[in-house]
Image (tube, rainbow, N blue to C red):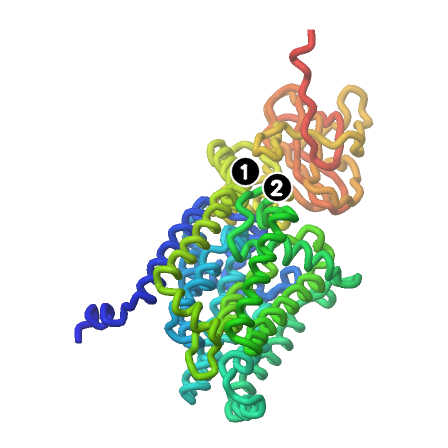
Amino acid sequence: MPLHERFVRRMTPLTSAAAALIALQAVVRGWVVSDSYYFQDDFAHLDLARSAGLTTEFLVRDYGGHVEVGQYFLMWLLSHAIDGSFAPAAFSVIVLQAATSLGLFQLLRTLFGDSRLILVPWTAYLFTPLALGFSSWWSAALQTLPMQLATVVVLLAVTRAHRQRSRRWALLSVLVFAAGLLMWQKAALILPLALAVHLLVTTHDLPWKERLVGLRRQWGMWSAHAGVLGAYIFFYLATVDEGTALTQAEPIRWGSLLTQTLFRMFVPGLFGGPWHARGAESTIYPYTETYAALIFLFVFACLVVLSFVVSGARAYAGWLLLVGYLTADLSLLALGRSDWIGLLLRDPRYVADALPVVTIAVLASCRGLLETGRSERAAAVWLRQRMTMAVVLRVVALLFVSSLITTVRMAPAVQHEYAANFTRGVADQMEAEPERSVLNSAPPYEISARADLEGMMNAVGAEVVFDRPAVEMFIFDGLAQLRLVDLFPGSDERTGPVKGCGWAVDQQEADLWSVESDDATPRVLRMGYYAGSEATLHVSVAGRSSSLDVPAGVGRAFFVVGPESGRVSARVEDGDGVCVTDLAVGAAWVAVQPDTTAQ
């Protein structure tokens, strides 16, 4: 049979609807992500990818308690295609999301059969606005999406290994688990989740003793998983600095986690709420008002009650799975980010890996609607008869529209417009006048806390040079506008010993001054001079040397220096002697411009 005929034969109403929904998700997510830009850690990782290349220095390192070898490899791979455009990053996010969505659909079919009802929680996963923050931030997306993908593939492989007694599926589950750990250390949660899904979902119809016996039958697979996890823990602890993995210093604030993270963010987000963007900023989710949050909580409570009505005591398995996983997620947030916990309570990144678990838990708790048999409940029969494909698609459409409203309103808040405008503004001005001297300074903290301007430009492929010595030096302000540089008021300053000249400098090296160490960055040496004709000054500060052509007349020369203490010396390389009238060293500051409006 030709390939296209086999494909058409396999297309059922369920798979056709799923294909349409994945395509629709790619359109919506692509619209949001394509207008985003690099942000925070993206610049630091891409800078190191370009400067260090594919080395252990880049791949194997502690980054704030994170070990993300796989993520760094993908960044290095795509860094060659990045020239200031976010398109390569956006493409990788869309592809990873589509693969994860397809994998989750296959997992749900494997666990629960080809029921049309699996479309409902799966749609909530596809379009929830909880995914916008991490999808629009490349580094966050390369944490969350590979972990979600590894989670669904491991669960799928473990389930098929159990049902088919297949060593190939068992081996695949171990290999994907190892790959997930290399992407993000939080993938360690996959193993306990796989055990829980096996015991609570896959073998739900067996007595507990037989479930445990089934685990022993596959001891080789589970032992391999445990061995991979043990080896990874050793590798992780050997890589991270002592004390950086956990920062928790005070008791876990369960009240705040429950009210802010679950009540005001997670539960409303599952249903597409809160239908506005108030309080949203970067990865922070909108603030859901109390009355609206109560409505979403009531809908969720109705779902829980319904699950027990249609499934009876079997419903507990799904909710136990979800509660257990969310408890682990929230505990890791409280333990690993206690220093930022007040800001991160409404940051979906820290519970986004639970989104596939939600779909499994909901369907497992509502299993009475999915299965027929002598023990099925009357309520389940009555409701199943009325949940036709047309009704299911209406519910799917309702969830889609609900999520789309919030998505459209949230999009500007998650697309990092400030970072895009600032980065492009700096790159355009540096490339327009490459000879102009501009200080390599720190960008606004809201854009990049770990990469300076030189690193940011290297990250986006802009070949520019900072910190040239000059008679006029500039610095970028927070709006990417160039400002003349001077020194911070009160900086250390000296005048020369010779009246009317200061220090007379000729072709012989002249010792001028000694500067103290200072960690202020960027640090600048300002040199006042008088030259009878054009000359080339060679200046050395604490062993760092540079040369500058100075025009005839009275002026100032600026040199970027390091934090070290040491001697300041100078000589004339070309031209007549120069008088160095004064010297000052200190942190760079925006020069005070004269008020030209004063009368």
Disc 2 on helix, strand or loop?
loop
Looking at the image, which residue is at 67% across and 29% down?
590
Q: State the mark number for residue 443.
A: 2
Q: Residue furthest left?
A: 1
Amino acid type indicated by mark 1: Phe
Q: Quadrant of residue 252 in the image?
A: bottom right
Quick one: 519 or 103, which is closer to the camera? 103
Q: Is residue 12 above or below residue 36?
A: below
Within 10 Å of disc 2 (Cα), the crowding (few <14, some 14-19, many 20+) is many
Q: Are marks 2 and 1 in contact (CB under 8 Å)?
A: yes
Q: Position of residue 113 (x, y in %)?
A: 40, 75
Disc 1 on helix, strand or loop?
helix
Q: Quadrant of residue 577 in the image?
A: top right
Looking at the image, which residue is at 52% across and 82% down?
204
Q: Is residue 54 above or below residue 34?
A: below
Q: Is residue 351 above or below residue 154?
A: above
Q: Position of residue 305 (x, y in %)?
A: 57, 67
Q: Position of residue 451 (x, y in %)?
A: 60, 48
**Which residue is under mark 1?**
422
Looking at the image, which residue is at 40% across and 54% down?
397
Residue 151 makes an appearance in the image = no
